[in-house]
Image (cartoon, coloured by chain):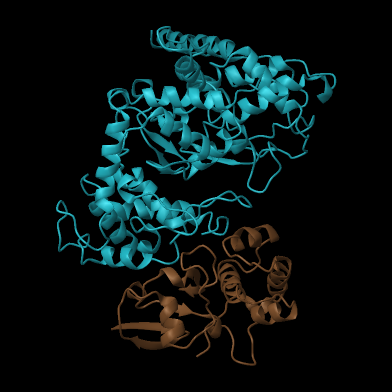
Chain colours: A cyan, B brown
Amino acid sequence: MVWRILIGVVVVIAVAFGTFYAWAWRGEIPPLPKHDASSFDPAIVAKGAQLAALASCDVCHTRAGGKPYAGGYPVKTPFGTIYGPNITPDRETGIGTWSAAAFRRAMREGVTRKGRHLYPAFPYDHFTYATDSDINAIYAFIMTREPVRQANRAPDIAFPLNIRLSAAAWKLLFLHRGPYRNEADKDDSWARGAYLTVSLGHCGACHTPRNQFGAEEQKRAFDGGQGEGWRAPPLNENSRAPVPWTTEAMFNYLRNGHDAAHGHAAGPMADVAHNLANASEKDVRAIATYVTSLSGARAGAASPDSIKTAVAAARKLTAPAYGTTPAHQTTGSAAGKDGLGAKIFTGACVTCHHSGGGLPISRPIDLGLSTPINADDPTNLLHIILTGVHPRPGRPGRIMPGFEGALTDAQIVAVVDYLRTRFSHRPRWNDVAGALARIRGQRQTAATEAPQ
Amino acid sequence: MTVLTVNGKEHSIDGDPNTPLLYVLRDDLKLNGAKFGCGLGQCGACTVLVDHQPVYSCLLPVSVLEGRQITTLEGLGKNGEPSALQRAFIDEQAAQCGYCIPGMIMRAQGLLNRKAAPSDAEVRAYMQPNLCRCGTHMRILRAIRRAINDTRTARAEPVR
């Protein structure tokens, strides 16, 4: 009797696995006999260039100092590190043998030309919604890049997730295949923006929280997530921006990496903004329209007058002069006007961040308008204080120096406490020291890579 | 009063603790190696080392520096006995007007304190924040490379 049950269980497991394996199995798509870059229509290639910029393909498919799209960029996940592969049209190490059909399957299903399952660090859960013509345009752009021979680096992932079928199991649970359906009652720009945000833009990859399996929690779409150790702020009504976003402000921020009422794009978002400068202006406007609408009532209530009032209120926190204490702030603590934080602020920060001053180079944001200072946790503020803000190497742009080597941990915690109480009405953060220790730990590995 | 440890020696500093380190170095201690460039942490001419790492002395109030090791250009070598990195800058004639050079040397020393043999790409990335208006970057890079090849520069200790 026991044997019968045992055999029954084994049979059920075997059948279940067999069914899963049959479902997960993908065949090889035949290689292209030869690759001819001149066969692509230049207009399609140009469209693909704009869409590849919008999708920020280069960020994960180019290593620091490496050739564009030749791969090697480490994508760090809670499950291990995955290295963005070479997607140049090299036939040995890149995707030079991939047909358009193979490329479309990779984008939609996360499967290589040979039929191997890709990990969801590649955001095919978003790209699956892209249209054939958009994916074909990106294909035309990629296949006309310079082929680079650069071998791919194997992912650094532990058992059992190193078995590729685990990615298939993930897809069974979490991949909802496209195409994307627009809501019909919105205007065209909104609908286009919704499509781009959800598909090629893959904004939710960072701005939506993920569950323990690394899948986006669809019920909390755009409620804020993480990217590269930074916090990706909520884009919905939980946005902590002191001034509500408008479509115009969002467009400025996405397109130029800066808006007067919101400040500069920093961290991973700086790369996104850099890319969006090369995307289609109309598409960036569409994304701005859609993303702004996500903050619902907050965005709806934003009129030019209410924005002006909100900016003035935030600026009041910074005026009339640093060193004075606004009424809402308690004194006598480390965060008070006589504390360590205030002293560091006066000595190290005020030179640039004083209200109303005209700097010869650029004027920093009024700190009362800063989203990181008003955020739910101090992660992004700590990143900015430690490493500063820098343009891409060799490019013009704003510079804030980092204070990583200059200030001790206790001094950084004190100045963060001070900034929070001085320039925000929100409650003090609980564990600034803990957040700082985590970031210091992450940064130790990259000690000599980044300028300060 | 603030007590600063500069090039291994303790100094008692009177005056406003918010004073930037650069002013104290130049005006009170007569250590004129570090230069005032922009005063905004944008150019690197004022770079010195604090606990072996490069910092902008124009942006650091002396109040935060008690108990920490400050090293200036003067602390790398003695008059007539330059450190290996200073020697390399002289040998490559890396200075034109020379205004940025103390900051360049201190920043490069900060890199060598972290890593004895950085690659050329690492040197370029690390030196990125420091500006030179004369355009002697290639000589500066050659000087740093020369110093790296000289094994004596694993770590510069302040001269007492």
Q: Nearer the viewer, residue B71 or B45?
A: B45
Residue at the spot x=45%, y=65% of the render?
Answer: A405
Q: Nearer the viewer, residue A425 or B27?
A: B27
Is B121 on the left-hand or right-hand side of B22?
right
Is A429 on the left-hand or right-hand side of A353?
left
Is A321 on the left-hand or right-hand side of B95?
left
Which quarter of the picture shows residue B130? bottom right
**Is residue B83 something that shows in the picture?**
yes
**Residue A233: x and y, percent?**
37, 36
Which quarter of the picture shows residue B125? bottom right
**Is residue A158 something that shows in the picture?**
no
- Position of residue B47 relative to residue A270, above or below, is below
Q: Nearer the viewer, residue A200 or A299?
A: A299
Q: Residue furthest bottom?
A: B80
- Position of residue A247 relative to residue B79, above or below, is above
Residue at the spot x=38%, y=88% of the render?
Answer: B11
Is B93 on the left-hand or right-hand side of A366?
right
**Residue A349: x and y, percent?**
37, 62
Q: How many marks?
A: 0
Residue at the spot x=37%, y=75% of the render?
Answer: B65
Which quarter of the picture shows residue A386? bottom left
**Residue A261: x and y, percent?**
37, 41
**Residue A404: x and y, percent?**
44, 61
Q: Quadrant of the N terminus of chain A?
A: top left
